[in-house]
Image (cartoon, helix red, strand yellow):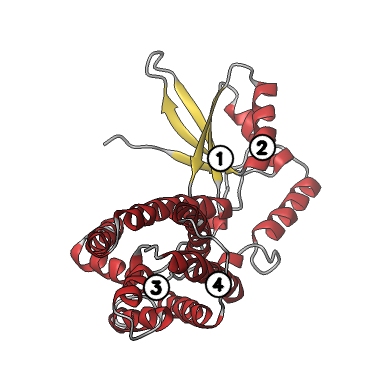
Amino acid sequence: MNNVQCTVYGNDMDAHSKATTTPRHEKRRAKLRAFLFSPGKNPLVGLRDSVAWNLLLITSGSLIFSVGASGILATNNIITGGIYGTALLLFSKVGLLSIALWYLVLNVPLFIVGFLHVGRSFFLYSVYSVVVITLSTMFIHVDFGITEQIYAAVAGGIVCGTGSGMVLRSLGSGGGLDILAIILNRYFNIGIGKTFLAFNATLFLLAATLYTPDIVIASIIQVFIASQSLDYTLSLFNQRKIVYIISDHSQRIADLLRDNLHQGATFIKGQGAYSGQDKLILMTITNAIMLKKIENTVFQNDSGALFIVENSFNVMGSTFGRGRQF
């Protein structure tokens, strides 16, 4: 395997900065970086890990999901995926308990197992989400007035997917199936996505024997739309751009990005496949707002530069926050 050499440039850990600046300017930049990247000074840094932020996400997302599921899906006999979908199926065909109580009962054994095998913060946040969904399903009843199943599938998918996405942006999850999937992945190396696929496939096969084809098709449409809405919601919270810049003036561009835009970057040592010449590839992570400024800076200093942009679903570590601990 070829070794790849990287030099981080333009952040607090850079001990090899070659910029020639006055001590006063360097002190100003140091103060700015300290404010931007210090959790103690900038309240936005570390917000994703704070209890208040996570409770806000979980509460809002759980309320949105439960209102959509009980007010749109349940009233039109549409089945969604996961534990809540199982609760809808049992309520429709067995009765005995309400949707909320079926949902709670189905989650209890999964949480008992999860208590021993997942992280405490993830476990507690997930329990809180289930409690909010259970209580809101019991006490909040919203009539959307949607009677056509196809319209209910579309609307329910958007609403439930948005709520689920907000919950998943927190450090917790929306219920017991997430915990089961994590345990199976940890001990049996079964992919989390495969667990959800197998569970939902079994659920819908069972629904196909109990419901009319129209309801089954509407339910599948709802799950598909919900997954798209969920992905879109997740991307709204942390949509980053990875920019690669290949230029003969990489050092100068890096200096300008750091000094003018306060944009950190990394040098990756590369080599042209045709010319064999060594190249310094500049990589930086930014957002859509800063992207145009970076592009202008690059081409104002090198019209022949190669500017590559990739979408990144999530960026974790350093000043970008940490991932969920299962």
Q: Is residue 216 left or right of residue 173?
A: left
Q: CA distance from mark 3 to mark 4?
A: 14 Å
CB contact under 8 Å: marks 1 and 3: no
- Which mark is in front, 3 or 2? 3
The tag on residue 175 is: 3
The quadrant of the image that shows the N terminus is top left
As shown in the figure, which amino acid type bears the numbered disc 3?
Answer: Gly
Q: Earlier in the sequence, mark 4 or mark 2?
A: 4
Depicted 152 relative to depicted 17: above or below: below
Q: Residue at x 33, y 37 (%)?
A: 3
Q: What residue would you read off at disc 4?
A: 63
**Residue found at the very far right of the displayed protein:** 24
Residue 265 appearing in the image: no
Q: CA distance from mark 4 to mark 2?
A: 42 Å
CB contact under 8 Å: marks 1 and 2: yes
The quarter of the picture where residue 297 lies is top right
Q: CA distance from mark 1 to mark 2?
A: 9 Å
The tag on residue 257 is: 2
Q: Earlier in the sequence, mark 3 or mark 4?
A: 4
